[in-house]
Amino acid sequence: MSASDDRVLTRILGPDGHLDSLMKAQKRFFEARPEQLEMAQAIAAAARNKNHLLVEAGTGTGKSYAYLVPLILWAVESKKRVLIATGTKALQQQLVERDLPFLHELFVTHLGTDFKFALCLGTGNYVCPRRLAKTESLGLFGDSKEVEQLQQLHRFSASSPTGRNVDLDFEPARGLWAQVNRESDLCLARNCPHFEQSFYWKARREQEKAQVLVANHHLLFAHIAAGGNAGGVLPPFDALVIDEAHHAEDVAASYLGLEISNLSAAKLIELLSNRKSGKTVISAVKWPERGELESRLNEVASEAREAVGRFFENLQMAMRFDDARSHTIRITRPNIISNELEEPIQRLENVIESALRLAVLSEDEELSRELEGFSNRCSEMRRAVRDILGQTREGYVYWTQSVPRLPDGFGKAARVPRMSLHGAPIEVAESLRESVWKQFKPTILTSATLTTGGSFDFLVERLGLSAPVLPPEPDDATNAAKVARNGANNATRSSTNTTNKSNDAVKQSNDSTDKEPEEFDVRTLTLGSPFDYPKNALIYVAADLPDPSTNVTMWEKAAIMRAAEVVKRTEGRAFILCTSYRLLDQTAQFLEKVMPRTIRILRQGEMARGKLLSEFRKDTHSVLVGTTSFWQGVDVPGESLSCVVIMKLPFAVPDEPMVQARVETIKERGQDAFVGYQVPQAVMMFRQGFGRLIRTATDRGVVAILDPRVKTKPYGRTFLESLPACNKTEDLERISLFVTGI
Ligand code: SF4
């Protein structure tokens, strides 16, 4: 890309451009949008100048084409690779199944330029032909349904071009899939006799030929946690787009942390020694020592299995987990239970090491690799348990969780809950600076919601895109000097506050030369939505309701009744977004009693999420009552969703361990955690909820906010001012008039 960037981009994305003509040729609707072109130009400049760019682009901007077009041009011309990381499966599918095939056709037919793209899935999504073949020789499965599914998997493996679990027409039992999927530490790669037929490696070869890779946030952060391009989870890439970037901090924290669960521990032991069949990982070898070693392995595996059971029973008792309920409890002191796993897992590891020595001596490369992988897993497990129980890691928060388990696919009754122990870094800023922002240039972060109150400061600070937050020092001049030395901070501060400033920053970036920035350079851009919000959306605020922070019971009662009033006026066609399961249940129960029978009430949890959404889309007058997962990543264009009821401002639960720890850390720095963390975080979620309403230029509807604090509290303005300009009312009757179009 050079000085002709803008002309090329205009030829593609501008009025009567290539995108327009190809869309028309395919009888698809396209409208050239100035915001889309502006975003594409800013991204082209970021790629040229290797600066990072945060782009908030309102719904309808067409941001996927806005980042794909300039980055494909850049990748092809400079022989680079770009990774697009998405937060949701829906966006991933849209990119791989619709946008990228379309752009491929456009680039080939209109520009004479070819490029390749590939979807990257986690390694565990592929069948491993070697492990699948081995299940037969080991005879691991005795249950008739498992045997039947195993045969289905063999047929699938023989006929599928992909070997991916998403292409299966049945859902294999988890225990079965765990025996036949690809596991990176057990994979023999080039030394595998099945290498040429290996689904994962075939996919990987395609990925390595591609200029554009698409993955999800989880895979991106797994790649980063494994050492980035050197770790090899994904093929190496040069530039990065994090779409739906408002999630990035939490996903990063979970991947940079530690976790051990009763299920993961049991799975590891089961892979080594099958409880039902007594077969082990070394059953197929012909060594003279095998018999003795195998019975030792079965013995230590059985001890380890019992130890895992005891360990998690102790945890359950110490935490007073109730099997029927979900719990998340922060652990604030070390050694809440004794570490009964260390010794049994060490004994298991010792036996595996003995087997490994024999495998090496007998030059059995396949088994050696496998045993080495299992040995590493045992030592990682021991380390995780030690670090979590001992709380050895500085800047970490620790917690435990218990989640009830539903009956499995074979009709077995509900079993012990999934119990887990976790440790995660409270702040990821410093780690992301080193592992992402300094490594991948440019990195583009985009979403419809990156700002709060018009500023990127919150995200910039949380993600470490600014200078590290320094503790207060007695000498202000020294502090100022430290901040001024940081190139990233200078660039960010000059471009975060307003759209105009952001655009200035982007223009600066266009004008700059191709030199490598000293550390990293961050620019921002805010683009409004092309949709006509003043005409198509009405905001209703129930300012007369009680304050939920002072009288939650009265507020709940009044808000639920008001929600019913609102959805009666919109004749259903509504999402009701709650902030807790309790509120969700109470709201759904009340609506079921008072709403006319013609309006179906759907509630989160009554069926799978995808099915619930499809029922909602089909039944135009239904109401869907949901909590966290329906605030974001849900796309229901058209009449079925004409009203979004926001019951309460979505402040994160204050005693959620990570939230609590972040609040404490911010307070320790002498900062106001409510203003600096809790409000901005809630504003982002609030904007996501609002964003469910208008998905296309022809959508229209009402957003009802039933939390009066947006009007009565000083911080409430930040919430309202973060929404697109719309007409606002406190009069319920205006909803009826708006709906009937008067
Ligand atoms: S190369 Fe790895 S994933 Fe492929 S069949 Fe062999 S062990 Fe399995």
Image (cartoon, rainbow, N blue to C red):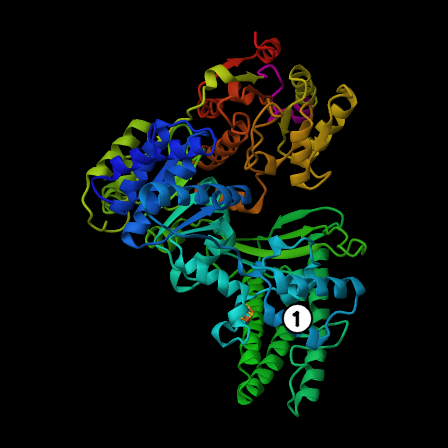
Q: Quadrant of residue 588?
A: top right
Q: Which residue is drawn at 58% across and 23% down?
A: 707
What type is the residue that disc 1 sits on?
Leu
| Image side of residue 559 versus residue 396, left or right | right
Q: Residue at x 78, y 62 (%)?
A: 145
Instruction: State ligand 1's quadrant.
Output: bottom right
Q: Could you tell me which quadrant the C terminus lies in?
A: top right
Residue nearer the viewer, 51 or 114:
114
Dot 1 falls on a residue whose secondary structure is helix
Q: Quadrant of residue 729?
A: top right
Q: Is residue 270 above or below residue 452?
A: below
Instruction: Please state the horizontal and vertical placement of residue 261, each as a whole percent of the image.
Output: 64, 59
Residue nearer the viewer, 131 or 453:
131
Instruction: Please state the horizontal and vertical placement of residue 549, each as a whole percent of the image.
Output: 59, 27
Q: Residues within 10 Å of mark 1 (few under 14, many from 20)?
A: some
Q: Main SS of the magenta segment?
A: loop
Q: Which residue lies furthest to the top in this view?
A: 742
Instruction: Please state the horizontal and vertical placement of residue 189, each as a whole percent of the image.
Output: 49, 71
| Image side of residue 438 versus residue 677, left or right | left
Q: Is mark 1 within 8 Å of ligand 1?
A: no
| Number of marks | 1
Q: Residue at x 27, y 38 (%)?
A: 8
Q: Could you tell me which quadrant the N terminus lies in?
A: top left
Query: Residue tagged by mark 1?
Result: 271
**Any part of residue 254 in sight:** yes
| Image side of residue 2 versus residue 155, left or right | left
Instruction: Please state the horizontal and vertical placement of residue 173, each as a whole percent of the image.
Output: 71, 59
User: What are the residue bounds of the magenta stretch?
Assistant: 542-556
Q: In this view, does 706 lie above or below 61?
A: above
**Any part of residue 265 in sight:** no
Q: Is residue 273 above or below residue 529?
A: below
Magenta run includes residue 545: yes
